[in-house]
Amino acid sequence: MTTSSGGTPGGGGASTLPQAPPSQGAPLAVYNGGIQDVWDRMRPQVISQLDALVAQNLNNQLYSNSTLTVEVVNANLSQGSDMTIAPGFTQLDTSHLVLRAPVQGAWKVVLAANLRVTLNVGSFSPAIDVPVEIVLDALSLEVDAVLDDSDPTRPVLQRIGQPKVDFTLRIDSTNALAQRLTGVLTAPANWLAQQAISVTLFALLPNLQGIQGIPGSIPGDGAPPLVDSGTQTPFEEVVDNVELKLRRVNQPHGTVLMAAMDTPATDSWLDAYRNGGPGVQGAPLSYGSPGDSAIWTGHYLAAEAYRYAVTGSSLALDNVGHTLKGIGALIDVNGSSGLLARGAAPEASSAGQTIVNSSSGVFRRAQLYGETWVGYQGGIGISRDQYSGVFFGLSVAYELVPPARADCELRIKQMLDYLIAHNWIVDEDRATWNGQNGSRGPTFWAPGSYQQLAFLLIGHRMDPPRYSAALAAAGPLAELAWLSAWTATFGVDHYYKFNLSHIGFYNYFRLETDPTRWQAMRRAYAMQERYVGHHRNPHFDLIQTSIDPSTAVDLYGSSREAMRQFLGTLHRELAPSVIDLSGVTWVTHQQFSYSNTSTGGFTLGGSTVQHPSEPLPMHLRRPSGHFIWQRDPFTPATPNQGNPRSEKPGLDLVLPYWMGRYMGAF
């Protein structure tokens, strides 16, 4: 057993932690094993999509030479194809990546094709339909990339090798004529095989050509922390009033929601919620989509846990209980299996009717707290985001609110046991993925995920015997966590990814006691911090100080000043009527982003974008609903952007404030 302290392994509090087990297994083998688990689940649908792509891209294609012309009447992947082994890495470090499909051995791809062969014999050119199977045996593809990791916080892609494809080709047919034509069909069959390879292998692997130099420049690089002005600011006064409003308006049934009010408002948090201010103004007419209710309910639970730890307030304890009721409903509405709902509410309530009338409708109903509740999964099912927020809140409340500890432990075990039992793959709450029906496939935790290790450490904190084996088996992935952290820094798009990583890293570093894993994960975190550490984001900065206490002197002051700026922004999801960007200096950057393919792969591409030379002041940033700190600080608002009736919960105020109070920043 060890005692945690600050930014060292196991740091982040003053509690005794159980010693984490040593890692078991080689990192690359464990990583590729995780890819194989996902591949096994998705392979039938992937092959179905590849079959459709083969037909789409090969049917009616023509091949011609001096001897014959061949038209592909129809083509598809045969049942004789064997793609059992998943793609994977044969080398994975910060200087060299080698990606191979399959990771070992070879695939067999069989094309069943009907070819219309026209022989070029003078004026007489007979056309013959010939059924054949074109067999690609010993098929593999390998791509390598060389990186410059002289700056360990910012590896740069120097070179992408040309894809290396190996296979042997044969033509099979029971058709007697086709057997006699085997010689002349060899060239068109080879052409057809190359087309099929282009469709199949390259649809599965990322397209990396032309992206040398990735991840590119860093927006706002070098911007210093804000300087604490020292201006007297009634933070706690405003926060206390926002807390009362949040409970009454944005949390009617325990989960956090955006509220549509019957009265518009255009005043700031400070003006509305300081003592004597008008407050929320109006009453809720309805509630917004519950699609992100779980993640923000978890964030609010963390805020109230910090508040309770700082103040011992009975109001904070009551809010913790109310929020735990909401989180319990998110789990119990799905039968208490550990499958988390995105949202849940009593069916007869306004929030419940929002779910009933949504495009995806009610996923499940359950009798909870003496009435019928409805659960919402959305059209794409639960996401990693939602689990991350709930784990974050429950883990903080477990540490800081002793009266809530048993309830927190119950809910954490329900979710964690579910994820482990399902191999960290969730697909029961959505349509079967086929690349066309709007489903994005299973939700899965990629190998090397900081989230997976953080979740396991949270469970191990509570019940070491129950989770030691799973933690030891996943432990080697810390060595390779740098990859997902690095790829996240290719651009500020999907900026919410940095909120997810910060709350995951927060729990990881405060609970990890293995020094080797801790240092490996620290390398991953350093890559992220290099990219966002200058964003003047108090939520991120406070977490940074928990990991590296030496940064507290500068970042505590910057956090206070950022929160002063925040109090001057509007409490409705609305931008001011005047947005003056005349003082902003714009800089051109190369940004990289990804797009998903219908086969479960993705493509990377670059674009030239303009960003401010440093993070924008809060009043110039585009408005955000639940949590401004998950939005990039470089996108400006447009005048009156948003809705003056959409009342934000205020999580972006109460969480940094109470976390900062707990850490000593306020």
Image (tube, rainbow, N blue to C red):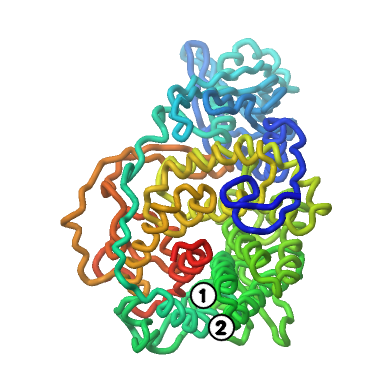
| Residue 507 visible in the current orientation | yes
> Mark 2 falls on what kind of element?
loop
Residue type marked 1 = Leu
Quarter assignment of residue 306: bottom right
SS category of the residue bearing label 1: loop
Q: Is residue 41 left or right of residue 593?
A: right
Comparing 284 with 554, the one in front is: 554
Furthest-right residue in view? 465
In percent of width and height, residue 226 lies at: 32, 55
Specify whether 546 is left or right of 42: left
Disc 2 residue type? Pro
- In the rendered image, the quadrant that contains the C terminus is bottom left
Which residue is at 75% across, 47% downward?
19
Label 2: which residue?
252
Whole-number angstrom distance, CA of label 2 to CA of label 1: 8 Å
Residues tagged 2 and 1 counted as in contact (Cβ below 8 A): yes
> Is residue 360 toward the left or the right of residue 516 in the image?
left
Task: Name the residue at 60% across, 16% down.
Answer: 185
Residue 291 in view of the camera:
no
109 versus 525 height, above or below: above
Q: Residue furthest toward the left?
A: 582
Relative to 435, say whether 308 is above or below: below
Which residue is disc 1 drawn over?
A: 257
Which of disc 1 and disc 2 is earlier in sequence? 2
Between residue 357 and residue 62, name the one nearer to us. 357
**Residue 135: where, in percent of width, then height?**
68, 22
Question: Quick one: label 1, few (<14), some, or many (20+) residues within 10 Å?
Answer: many
Q: As displayed, is residue 497 above or below residue 370?
A: above
Find residue 566 and report its horizontal and vertical position in percent. Answer: 35, 67
Name the residue at 45% across, 24% down.
148
Residue drawn at 47 percent across, 26 percent down: 149
